Every structure is written in C-alpha cells, then in structure tokens.
Image (spheres, helix red, strand yellow):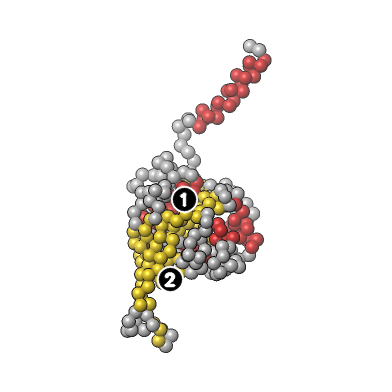
C-alpha cells in the first residue's frame, strides 16, 4: 500500500469515528439550565420547586438554581458577580425581580452571553427588572430589547383569560386557552411588541373600579367595569440570533404550579434551544 493510500485510509477512519459515536444509542445528556431567581414580591422559595420539578417532569433538565434570598427589588443576584456566570449552561431562566438594579455595567454583564447567542426564558417580574432611563417613556431599554416588550406596570390581581393567538406556532400548537386564578396583567406600555418579537398569547382581565372617598374605595357606590388586554406570552429574536421566550404570567403559586402554565414554559424553553420535538418533550405522565 502506498504512503498516500495509507494516509487516506487513516484520515477516513478518524473522520468517520465521531459520527459512529453519535449513533451509538447512548442517551443525550440533559439540558443544563440555570434558574436565576429572587428579589421582591413573590414566594420564590416555593416557586423554585414548582418550576424545576414541573419542567423536569416534561423535559430532561439538569437544574442549577441561583437563589438570591434578598427580598428587595434593589439587590443584584450574587451570581452576576462572576464574569463567567453563564458558562456551562445551555439556557438561562430569568425569574428575578430586580426592578431597581439599574447599573449599566451589571446589565451588560447579564446581557453579554445572550448577545452571543445563549437562549433564555424570562418569567413574570423578569420583565420589570433592570429599569434604566427610558423604561417609563415607551422607549425600549437594553433589557426590554432583550425581552421584546416594553412593560411598566400592572393592574389589580384578578383572573386573566389567556387566549392563544398563533395556534400554528410550535410552542402553542397543542395548548388550550385557560383562565388563571387572580394574577397580575402586565401592561404593554407602547401598545405593541418590539419589531423583533412575535405574539403567542393575549390576556384579558375584567374588573370593577369604584370611586374613591376619603382616600378609600367606596364600594357602596356604583362601580365602573374596566377591561384590560395585553400580550402575555411571546417570542423574541435578540441581537439578530438569540431565541428568547417570555411570559408575564406567574405571580401567584397557584399559577406557577398549574400544569397549563408549566406546559407553556417548558415548550418555550425547548423552543429557545431549538429542541421542541418528541425526542426532548416527555410524554404526559
């Protein structure tokens, strides 16, 4: 055998071997997810379990939890002190409530890996976090460019009728409309999503507003019915390439542990990774 022929045989052997290993039948490794959670106004201690256990029943996820026990909205999650905070994770779930953490360097540290393509899921108060100049002026701040929605507040806690708008999307294709328990309907301050975002579900909330007398609602007087509507679930393409799934639902424990909510978030997480398929979505238990 000539030297050239021996070289070609060896080259072919070394290039084919990795492909042979891929089809060896070994199970794929779990998805490595980081849940960043904590801050103001929510029962995060319980919701951590609802999210991690609930999603893991639906997909093969290995969770790392970065829980900040500080209960204010002005404290930075300590994980962001690490420049490489996102290393070794396939997806980040942002469930923090850090409205007044507004340092631009901190926000850039959080956004940098996502700018480079790291997928993300943003839940509830994550939408109202990292408020910088412009957040209350219908201008997309750097964080809101990431989430894909400008939101500046919410109404009372009342049930929200969730209606899926794009039933052909992979995330929503097998899901049905439902009505939540008392929840916060986050506003769409500019009246629409950012151009990079795509609406999946809307929420409608109906409630009565009563006149105020001596600084308190006068419920003995006739009330005025108010109907609020807003987008409550959507996708975003950040920095031209990164998939981000977001939902403003998830204030109260009863919603976070609701199978319909967990189905939605699980499908959004897998979609962000490009893995929303039968091979990654577990059959219903």
Left or right, residue 44 beside residue 173: right
> Is residue 64 shown to the viewer in this render?
no
N-terminal-most mark, 2 or 1: 2
What x and y, as percent, mark residue 226?
Answer: 37, 73
Q: Nearer the viewer, residue 121 or 43?
A: 121
Label 2: state its secondary structure. strand
Residue at 43% of width from left, 60% of height from top? 232
Relative to 44, does residue 24 appear above or below in the rendering?
above
Q: Residue furthest bottom?
A: 214
Q: Residue furthest top?
A: 1
Q: Residues within 10 Å of mark 1 (few under 14, many from 20)?
A: many
Left or right, residue 142 beside residue 280: right
Closer to the eye: label 2 or 1: 2
What x and y, as percent, mark residue 43?
Answer: 45, 65
Q: Are marks 2 and 1 in contact (CB under 8 Å)?
A: no
For residue 155, the mark is 2
Residue at 53% of width from left, 29% of height from top? 19
What x and y, as percent, mark residue 132?
Answer: 60, 66
Q: Nearer the viewer, residue 69 or 121?
A: 121
Left or right, residue 18 beside residue 220: right
For residue 70, the mark is none
Q: Nearer the viewer, residue 239 or 40?
A: 239
Residue at 42% of width from left, 42% of height from top? 277
Quadrant containing the N terminus in the rendered view? top right
For residue 269, the mark is 1
Q: Residues within 10 Å of mark 2 (few under 14, many from 20)?
A: few
Q: Nearer the viewer, residue 17 or 133?
A: 133
Residue at 55% of width from left, 30% of height from top? 18
From mark 2 to mark 1, how far is it between C-alphas? 27 Å
What x and y, as percent, mark residue 282?
Answer: 39, 44
Label 1: state its secondary structure. helix
> Is residue 162 shown to the viewer in this render?
yes
């Amino acid at each position: 055998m000539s030297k050239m022929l021996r070289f070609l045989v060896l080259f072919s052997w070394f290039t084919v071997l990795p492909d042979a290993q891929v089809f060896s039948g070994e199970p794929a490794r779990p998805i490595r997810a980081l849940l960043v959670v904590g801050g103001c106004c929510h029962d995060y201690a319980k919701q951590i379990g609802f999210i991690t256990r609930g999603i893991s029943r639906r997909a093969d996820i290995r969770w790392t939890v970065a829980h900040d026990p500080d209960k204010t909205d002005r404290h930075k999650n300590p994980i962001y002190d690490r420049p490489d905070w996102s290393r070794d994770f396939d997806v980040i779930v942002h469930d923090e409530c850090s409205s007044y953490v507004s340092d631009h360097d901190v926000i850039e540290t959080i956004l940098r890996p996502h700018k480079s393509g790291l997928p993300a899921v943003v839940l509830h108060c994550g939408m109202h976090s990292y408020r910088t100049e412009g957040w209350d002026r219908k201008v997309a701040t750097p964080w809101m460019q990431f989430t894909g929605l400008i939101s500046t507040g919410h109404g009372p806690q009342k049930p929200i009728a969730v209606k899926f708008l794009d039933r052909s999307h992979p995330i929503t294709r097998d899901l049905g409309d439902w009505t939540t328990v008392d929840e916060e309907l986050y506003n769409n301050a500019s009246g629409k999503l950012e151009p990079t975002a795509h609406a999946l579900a809307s929420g409608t909330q109906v409630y009565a507003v009563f006149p105020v007398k001596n600084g308190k609602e006068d419920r003995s007087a006739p009330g005025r019915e108010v109907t609020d509507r807003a987008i409550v679930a959507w996708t975003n393409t950040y920095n031209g390439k990164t998939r981000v799934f977001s939902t403003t639902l998830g204030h109260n424990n009863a919603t976070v542990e609701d199978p319909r909510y967990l189905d939605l978030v699980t499908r959004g997480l897998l979609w962000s990774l490009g893995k929303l398929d039968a091979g990654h979505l577990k059959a219903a238990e």
